[in-house]
């Protein structure tokens, strides 16, 4: 051996050592495999065949330089649709594991050769290529939001809309850790007043203004002028309704979802599917962020074309949400914020007043001006008494006198215009009504608003105008149909099958992001026979993998994710009797029969872990 070769070998090690470093060791090679059942694969293929973005994805994958792309467009779409369907987190490594679990017949169906191994690099390269095409001006009609909506529409191709939808947003915490001890929740100023919290800015209209005694965090500022507290540069701070030991502030995203609801009160039940979505950084403008979810529906929503939205959407400036939604042809129904309720004067010379978004004649009796809205916590006799007072006030209201015109104008007739609902001395025709009709206190010969016909425009309180009075039983029955959107957001946090993502993974743009926990829900309890096999049987993990023991590690419940240690996950816990009161009381969704079978308890491990401690403490106390 020459000195030069001996020196090179001595400097970097022996030739056998160099060869060993080039070969990946067995424990470094991922052997995790997630099998796909035939019925699951058939469902995904049906979705792909009805997807409007299929041709666009094919064009992106086929238009390239160099060797032929092995990972086809159909295989790419099938892999990303099956990953959440199998209850796996939306990670690209999991997508590659799902592809490795396909049979030869399943590979042939999506044009994937049986001998080709799809790696993480192949998945990542395909996703990056699609992201570049969505941002390219060559495909102006397709962006990230359009591709995600096309996949969502394909899953609902045989589910017709009901004609009424509900809109609301839910919080999704970021995967990254907040790196500042006291972050400032700098939400958009055009939003409901922030809560009384130390992290709230002293002046919501100028959240970044430096004031004496107010500490601003030393954090970078994004292009939107808001602070970035994590390595996830798209996540922002926002407020939320805290539940289950959550904080009222979080760092992440707001997912705006539209779901189907019954077309009218008393109708249904309706399967609450996610009709459209839009993801935005937390704390963003609710109206600007929620409007794209409404616009993408187009003309698919038929009559009565009603939209029930949360109060956060009608509290913003009218030209940001309320007026654009009206121009789309929707009839809006809201729950008013306490700051919105009250009496406002009408136009000069019309002798009218506005009360909670409804126009009344100024002859309204004084005792009917300030009425409490009907609440679910009211007793039956209080509800009946409040409804009678609302109906007495309804007689003095202006009602529509024609359809809304394309320019936004709409005619409204007063209470004394035939058919009269009140008897007014200044309108002789109305005095012909029976004495059971209320008589106004108007002075004869003095102008009043009872017999007028007015034209209202879109600028006249569009954030509060509804087809009925706010606070009545009719309003309550119609507005409370929005519980369907709460059913979409409601899910058991630790159930693996509920951690599925229903949109494409993030393509650097926050309009596409893993939306954990958003899945179709029904008003009635789901039939166990429809749910198919348990999650443990739908996903088979091959040799060399520990499986998905904790699929909900990044729970949307706090600023940092807490994952149980290895010792906690592998600990064999004693069984709880089926008739145990603590187990059924704290977690009634666990079937009683499953508590007697240890193999079935795998799916409930995360939830049952919270039950055992309290159960054995109570047992020891007895």
Image: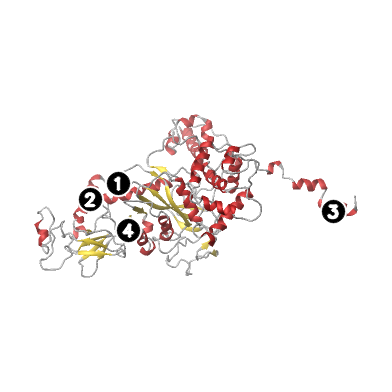
The one nearer the camera, 542 or 545, is 542
Picture coordinates of residue 235, whole percent (x, y): 52, 57
Q: On the picture, is 601 further left or further right than 12? A: left
Report helix, strand or loop for mark 3. helix
Cα separation, mark 1 vs mark 2, equals 17 Å
Q: Which mark is residue 387?
A: 2
Specify which label sits upstream in the sequence, 4 or 1: 1
Report helix, strand or loop for mark 2. helix
| Residue at the disc numbered 1 | 265
Q: How many marks?
A: 4
Q: Quadrant of the C terminus?
A: top left
Q: Which mark is residue 480?
A: none
Query: Which circle, 1 or 2, is nearer the viewer?
Result: 1
Picture coordinates of residue 78, whole percent (x, y): 54, 45
Specify which label sits upstream in the sequence, 1 or 2: 1
Count neighbours of disc 1 (C-alpha within 10 A) and say few if under 14, some if 14 to 19, many if 20 or more: some
Cα separation, mark 1 vs mark 3, equals 83 Å
Specify which label sits upstream in the sequence, 1 or 3: 3
**Which residue is at a point 23% across and 51% down the rendered structure image?**
386
Cα separation, mark 4 vs mark 1, equals 25 Å
Picture coordinates of residue 47, whole percent (x, y): 49, 44
| Residue at the disc numbered 4 | 338
């Amino acid at each position: 051996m020459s000195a030069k070769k001996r020196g090179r070998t001595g400097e970097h090690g022996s030739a056998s050592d160099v060869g060993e470093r080039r070969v990946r060791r067995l424990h470094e090679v991922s052997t995790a495999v997630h099998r796909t059942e035939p019925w699951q694969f058939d469902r995904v293929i049906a979705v792909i065949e009805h997807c409007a973005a299929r041709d666009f994805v094919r064009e992106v994958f086929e238009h390239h330089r160099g060797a032929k792309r092995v990972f086809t467009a159909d295989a790419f779409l099938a892999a990303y649709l099956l990953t959440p369907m199998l209850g796996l987190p939306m990670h690209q490594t999991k997508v590659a594991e799902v592809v490795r679990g396909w049979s030869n017949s399943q590979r042939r169906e999506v044009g994937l050769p049986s001998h080709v191994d799809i790696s993480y690099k192949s998945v990542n390269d395909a996703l990056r290529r699609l992201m570049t095409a969505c941002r390219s001006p060559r495909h102006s009609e397709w962006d990230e939001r359009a591709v995600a909506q096309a996949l969502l529409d394909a899953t609902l191709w045989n589910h017709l809309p009901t004609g009424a939808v509900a809109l609301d947003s839910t919080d999704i915490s970021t995967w990254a850790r907040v790196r500042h001890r006291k972050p400032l929740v700098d939400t958009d100023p055009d939003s409901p007043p922030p809560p009384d919290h130390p992290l709230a800015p002293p002046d919501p209209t100028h959240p970044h203004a430096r004031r004496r005694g107010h500490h601003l965090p030393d954090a970078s500022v994004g292009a939107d002028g808001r602070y970035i507290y994590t390595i996830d540069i798209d996540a922002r701070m926002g407020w939320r309704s805290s539940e289950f030991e959550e904080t009222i502030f979080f760092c992440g995203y707001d997912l705006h979802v539209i779901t189907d609801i019954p077309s009218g009160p008393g109708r249904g039940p309706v399967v609450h599917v996610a009709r459209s979505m839009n993801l935005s950084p937390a704390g963003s403008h609710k109206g600007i962020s929620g409007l794209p979810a409404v616009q993408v529906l187009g003309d698919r929503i038929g009559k009565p074309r009603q939209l029930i939205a949360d109060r956060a959407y009608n509290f913003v400036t009218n030209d940001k949400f309320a007026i654009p939604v009206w121009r789309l042809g929707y009839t809006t129904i809201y729950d008013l914020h306490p700051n919105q309720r009250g009496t406002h004067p009408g136009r000069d010379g019309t002798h009218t007043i506005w009360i909670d978004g409804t126009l009344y004649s100024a002859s309204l009796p004084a005792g009917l001006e300030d009425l409490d809205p009907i609440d679910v916590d009211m007793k039956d006799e209080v509800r009946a008494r409040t409804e009678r007072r609302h109906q007495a006030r309804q007689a003095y209201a202006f009602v529509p006198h024609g359809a809304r015109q394309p320019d936004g104008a709409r005619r409204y007739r007063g209470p004394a215009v035939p058919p009269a609902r009140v008897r007014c001395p200044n309108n002789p025709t109305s005095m012909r009504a029976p004495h059971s009709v209320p008589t106004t206190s108007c002075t004869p010969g003095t102008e009043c608003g009872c017999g007028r016909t007015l034209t209202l425009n879109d600028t006249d309180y569009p954030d509060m105008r509804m087809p009925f009075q706010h606070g009545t039983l009719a309003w309550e029955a119609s507005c409370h149909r929005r519980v369907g959107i709460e059913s979409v957001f409601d899910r058991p946090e630790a159930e693996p099958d509920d951690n599925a993502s229903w949109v494409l993974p993030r393509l650097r743009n926050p309009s596409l992001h893993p939306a954990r926990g958003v899945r179709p829900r029904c008003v009635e309890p789901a039939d166990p026979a429809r749910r198919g096999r348990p999650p443990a049987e739908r996903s088979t993990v091959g040799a060399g993998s520990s499986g998905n023991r904790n699929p909900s590690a990044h729970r949307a419940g706090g600023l940092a994710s807490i994952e149980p240690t290895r010792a906690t996950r592998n600990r064999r816990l004693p069984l709880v009797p089926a008739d145990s009161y603590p187990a059924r009381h704290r977690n009634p969704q666990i079937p009683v029969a499953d508590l007697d079978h240890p193999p079935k308890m795998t799916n409930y491990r995360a939830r049952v872990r919270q039950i055992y401690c309290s159960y054995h403490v109570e047992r020891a106390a007895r």
